[in-house]
Image (spheres, rainbow, N blue to C red):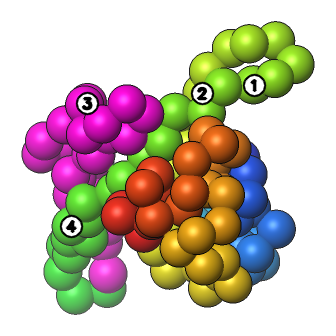
Amino acid sequence: YIVKTTVPAQQALLDVQSIESWAKETDWAGLEIVKHTPKLGKRHAQVEFKAYFKTPNELQTHHELSAFVKVKSKADNDARWYFLDPTVAMTITQKQPCICGSGEKFKRCCGGYI
């Protein structure tokens, strides 16, 4: 699910085995949506959340502010929201076309959120 909901240009760069191992080995205890900012621009949004998980000694919290981009599918003209993963090392310059396929330059689109 994490891979499929990451922006398609980053999916092949993800370490799927590590993600799968982390998800299976973690004893998840809950999710709290702290804040949702649906309109950061034409196609961007943010979600602040806390994911709770258990360790042998205590309950821990992963607190994150995640950026998302709305991408239109050319095949069926439908739109989906995708996670922009700031931990993925990409070789893209600010002047190249954006990874979301918007047609804008990366720096004017998703570059500000990664």
Looking at the rendered structure, the kind of residue marked 1 is: Ser
Q: How far apart are marks 1 and 2 (CA)?
A: 8 Å
Q: Which residue is drawn at 22% across and 52% down?
A: 49
Judge the density around disc 4: few (<14), some (14-19), many (≥20) Cα neighbours within 10 Å.
some
Q: Residue at x 31, y 85 (%)?
A: 56
Q: Does the magenta stretch include residue 100?
A: no
Q: Is the magenta stretch mostly helix, strand or loop?
A: strand
Q: Residue 81, position in %: x, y?
A: 53, 34
Start-end of magenta stretch: 31-55
Which secondary structure, mark 2? strand
Closer to the chain start, of discs 4 and 2, is 4
Looking at the rendered structure, the kind of residue marked 4 is: His
Closer to the chain start, of discs 1 and 3, is 3
**In the visual, does 63 lie left or right of 14?**
left
Name the quarter where the C terminus is drawn.
Answer: bottom left
Q: Mark 1 points at which residue?
A: 73
Closer to the chain start, of discs 2 and 3, is 3
Q: Distance between the residues labelled 3 and 4?
A: 19 Å
Q: Distance between the residues labelled 4 and 2?
A: 24 Å
Answer yes or no: do the residues labelled 1 and 2 have beta carbons within 8 Å?
Answer: yes
Which secondary structure, mark 3? loop
Q: Which residue is drawn at 21% across and 52% down?
A: 48
- Is residue 52 shown to the viewer in this render? no
Q: Mark 2 points at which residue?
A: 80
Q: Name the residue under label 3.
A: 38
Q: Distance between the residues labelled 2 and 3?
A: 14 Å
- Image height check: is 84 above or below 60? above
